[in-house]
Amino acid sequence: MQCEDEGVSPSQQSEPPDISSHTPDPSPQVIRLPRLALVGVVLLFFGVCFPALSWPAAFGWLFIVPIAVAFWVLRVRTTVSSEGLAMRRVLGSDQLTWDEVKGIHFPDRRWARVVLNDKTEKSLPLVRFDRLPVLAAASGGRITDPYAAAAEADTTPEDEE
């Protein structure tokens, strides 16, 4: 039995394209602080050591500060999936399905806020406007990507008169 592609080199055979670095992954996305932020926690710990070790009775409580910051770095996150949103804060967490979500808005230079059907709002920890393509891909199209919409508008040919 002969292969139909006998004379075709492997580079000319059709293969599905690899996932591009510009194509967001549609799987659930976890938005959190990078683990590199723990380096700052270590520096904070060393900064606290000097007063806390020199006069422990007065400044010993300062060791709580780097521990609290490390806990915040490791705990706070937002997970976006096709089922909904999961927000984890320092104290407590929330889970929302997409049926409960009316929209998302971005107040002045702050984290995104999700607007629920009952017109209440909840913050999305660590989600900024630059994460919209990731949110759009992970939400299964429930959140629109304004960057992609602008790119589509630029590539569509205008009507010729």
Image (spheres, rainbow, N blue to C red):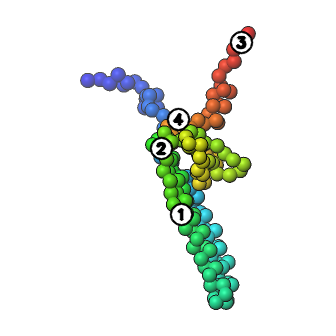
Given this view, does label 4 or label 1 mark the residue nearer the observer?
1
Quickly name the residue at label 3.
Answer: 160
Q: Is residue 105 above or below residue 78?
A: above
Whether residue 42 is visible to the viewer of this picture, yes or no, is: no
Mark 1: give few (<14), some (14-19) or many (20+) Cα within 10 Å.
few
Going from the N terminus, do you reach mark 1 or mark 3 first? 1
Quickly name the residue at label 1.
Answer: 91
Given the image, on which type of amino acid does mark 4 rest? Gly
Give how far apart the Cα atoms at labels 4 and 3 are.
32 Å
Marks 2/3 in contact by CB < 8 Å: the verdict is no
Going from the N terminus, do you reach mark 1 or mark 2 first? 1
Mark 2: give few (<14), some (14-19) or many (20+) Cα within 10 Å.
few
Going from the N terminus, do you reach mark 2 or mark 3 first? 2
Quickly name the residue at label 4.
Answer: 141
Disc 2 on helix, strand or loop? Answer: strand
Mark 4: give few (<14), some (14-19) or many (20+) Cα within 10 Å.
few
Whether residue 131 is visible to the viewer of this picture, yes or no, is: yes
Given this view, does label 1 or label 3 mark the residue nearer the observer?
1
Q: Position of residue 34 (x, y in %)?
A: 58, 59
Mark 3: give few (<14), some (14-19) or many (20+) Cα within 10 Å.
few
Quickly name the residue at label 2.
Answer: 97
Which residue is at 59% across, 77% downward?
Answer: 64
Q: Position of residue 57 (x, y in %)?
A: 64, 89
**Image quarter hosting the C terminus:** top right
Which residue is at 48% across, 39% downward?
Answer: 99
Q: In which image quadrant can residue 68 be found?
A: bottom right
Q: Is residue 51 above or below residue 69?
A: below
Given the image, on which type of amino acid does mark 2 rest? Thr
Given the image, on which type of amino acid does mark 1 rest? Leu
| Closer to us: 12 or 26 | 26
